[in-house]
Amino acid sequence: MTTASAEPATTPKAPSRRLLAVELLIVLGLSLGASGVSSLISFVGSLTESADLGSQVATLNASRAPGRPWLDLAWQLYYVARGLMPVVLVGYLLVREGASLRTLGFDLRHKLSDLGRGALVAACIGGSGLALYLVAQAADVNLAVAPSGLPDVWWRIPVLVASAWQNAILEEVVVVGYLLRRLQQIGWGWPAAVAASAVLRGSYHLYQGVGGLVGNMVMGVVFCLLYRRWQRVGPLVAAHALIDTTAFVGYALLAGHVSWLP
């Protein structure tokens, strides 16, 4: 009696640099790379408008169903969840290579220190970012940014907070942790990888104008340097979320009560 011999176990080969580059382009094409292209088209549209840039308004967190709050809420939650799917994809791809999102420092192992560092970074960057925005808007090279266009209903503040955290998780995991890891695996040097990350971050904020582009490129360089030092995206997620939460919620509460907000 003969038995079939078991096939020898094989260790999967590490993907080639070419496959990693293709994977990176696919992830960016499904997420923030596509947002960069969309932002460029939007900026060209703003430049070709008859009105000056400074008199145009870019509204973030706009209503998806004006006058229909429950349908609007459903759309808001849908877009928050959909916006996190590239992070899920990145997590899956990392697991396939034997790593995980924890490898990028996206976990709760050091949540208190991450939050503390994030709050410090937010305090430093938030004020300087606001100053740059005001200068760029006064110089007519930036649109007026309205961080919230949501109706004054009970779910407005929770949705704005959720949107802030979704933006922070998506951008820091993809544009810092994942992008830098893949570029270095492909063979890019550290300065080139930082430049690519910063340019990408600036590109998908170009719809706001030149100030949005430059300010976010500078922020991108700072965040990459902090990631290299801490080896964690957790503090960067916290910092970004705190900055956006302050901007979104602060605008929602102050709009119509102060003259300097659009």
Image: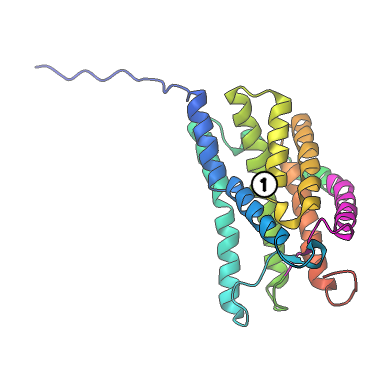
Can residue 223 be found in the magenta stretch?
no
Main SS of the magenta part reads: helix
With respect to residue 125, does 185 lie above or below? above
Q: Position of residue 66 (x, y in %)?
A: 62, 79
Q: Is residue 92 left or right of residue 224?
A: left
Residue 109 showing in the rendered view: no
Which residue is rendered at x = 78% and y = 30% of the image? 229
Q: Is residue 242 left or right of residue 99?
A: right
Going by the numbered disc 1, the residue's amino acid type is Glu
Which residue is rendered at x = 48% and y = 33% of the image? 96
Q: Residue furthest left?
A: 1
What are the residue bounds of the magenta stretch? 120-148
Q: Position of residue 16 (x, y in %)?
A: 48, 23
Q: Position of residue 201 (x, y in %)?
A: 70, 44
Q: Is residue 5 left or right of residue 117?
A: left
Q: Quadrant of the N terminus?
A: top left
Under circle 1, the secondary element is helix
Which residue is rendered at x = 82% and y = 72% of the image? 253
Q: Residue furthest bottom?
A: 67
Residue 181 showing in the rendered view: yes
Q: How is the image coloured?
A: rainbow
Residue under pointer 1: 171
Q: Number of numbered discs present?
A: 1
**Front-lying residue, 220 or 206:** 206
Q: Quadrant of the C terminus?
A: bottom right
**Front-lying residue, 142 or 197:** 142
